[in-house]
């Protein structure tokens, strides 16, 4: 009779937190990862490298940092996502990191989504990240025109102010 031992998967796989096939592919590239995570109210973009003892975060940027730069709107919209990506890319350039690969984790990659706005911000700041241009949100969406039309607020000027402060760093 055949041996019928049950193989128990790793804990993080059982909990649905890690896709190990993707992780191995990222690690074999030996490039830093631009890790993009979102919550309902914010975005986090981190540059992470693999080390045998555990991953190490080199730089990080989040929506809360935008408030310090004068951002007056939600940290969870497309414009804030772009600014977080731009800030992360700027910090990466200051840390002498020139290229990375995008890691969106377990999120479904949807064309034009906020996750790709973070990626676009990082690319516009000078970070080299391989991507498909068709997945990037439209420029008027990144600038917040859809919010300005709906809420009757001047988000576009605030966007430009915060972007110029980030560029000045």
Image (spheres, rainbow, N blue to C red):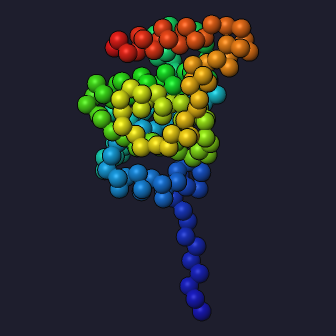
Can residue 79 be seen in this snapshot?
Answer: yes
What's the residue at 51%, 39% (across, down)? 133
What's the residue at 56%, 40% (across, down)? 135
Q: Position of residue 88 (x, y in %)?
A: 41, 27
Q: Position of residue 21 (x, y in %)?
A: 48, 59
In the figure, 3 relative to 53: above or below?
A: below
Quadrant of the image for the C terminus? top left
In the picture, measured across the screen, residue 145 lies left or right of residue 66, that is right
Closer to us: 96 or 54? 96
Q: Position of residue 113 (x, y in %)?
A: 61, 35
In the picture, measured across the screen, residue 47 lies left or right of residue 143, that is left
User: Would you identify the image quadrant in which residue 111 lies?
Assistant: top right
In the figure, 12 relative to 168: above or below?
A: below
In the picture, measured across the screen, residue 21 lies left or right of residue 41, that is left
In the figure, 63 relative to 101: above or below?
A: above
What's the residue at 52%, 54% (across, down)? 19
């Amino acid at each position: 009779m055949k041996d019928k031992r049950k193989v128990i998967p790793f804990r993080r796989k059982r909990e649905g937190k890690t896709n190990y096939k993707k992780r191995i592919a990222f690690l074999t590239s030996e490039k830093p990862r631009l890790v993009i995570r979102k919550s309902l109210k914010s975005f986090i973009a981190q540059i992470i490298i693999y080390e045998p003892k555990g991953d190490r975060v080199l730089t990080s940027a989040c929506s809360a940092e935008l408030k310090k730069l004068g951002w007056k709107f939600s940290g969870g919209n497309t414009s804030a996502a772009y600014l977080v990506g731009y800030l992360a890319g700027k910090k990466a350039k200051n840390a002498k990191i020139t290229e990375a690969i995008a890691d969106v984790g377990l999120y479904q990659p949807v064309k034009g989504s906020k996750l790709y706005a973070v990626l676009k911000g990082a690319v516009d700041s000078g970070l080299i990240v391989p991507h498909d241009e068709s997945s990037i949100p439209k420029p008027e969406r990144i600038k917040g025109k859809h919010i300005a039309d709906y809420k009757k607020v001047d988000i576009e000027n605030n966007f430009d102010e915060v972007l110029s402060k980030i560029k000045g760093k």
